[in-house]
Amino acid sequence: MVENVIGDCTKADAVEQYVIDELRKMGSDALHCWAESAVDKATEQIRKEQPGLHGNGKKKSAGTPPTES
């Protein structure tokens, strides 16, 4: 961006907005990675503390079929 090889940012406002957008993307990616790691750690900790627990997983039932009248 500093060298502006492509030449698409000729005004300071455009460059500023580009930098802000990139920082937001980086922050969002970092938070997503952190959250996934935090969930994994919390799950592992709970499983160590309570080995009898197990996850239910996804529900396989679509519900009760409607009855005919």
Image (spheres, grey):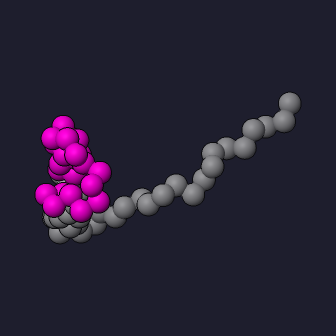
Is residue 24 in sight in this rendering? no
Residue 65 figure quarter: top right
Tell me which segment is drawn in magenta. Answer: 1-25
Determine if the magenta segment contains residue 21.
yes
- Give the camera-side residue of 59 and 28: 28
Residue at 29% from the left image edge and 60% from the top image edge: 6
Residue 45 figure quarter: bottom left
Give how far across and how far down residue 21 sits, in percent: 23, 46
Q: Is residue 4 left or right of residue 57?
A: left
Q: Is residue 56 left or right of residue 43?
A: right
Give how far across and how far down residue 64 sits, in percent: 67, 44
Residue at 60% from the left image edge and 53% from the top image edge: 61
Give how far across and how far down residue 59 sits, in percent: 52, 55
- Give the camera-side residue of 18 and 58: 18
Residue 42 figure quarter: bottom left
- Give the camera-side residue of 53 and 10: 10
Residue at 34% from the left image edge and 64% from the top image edge: 54
Give how far across and how far down residue 68 sits, in percent: 84, 36
Q: Is residue 60 left or right of residue 51?
A: right
The vertical placement of 44 against 19, above or below, is below
Residue at 22% from the left image edge and 51% from the top image edge: 22
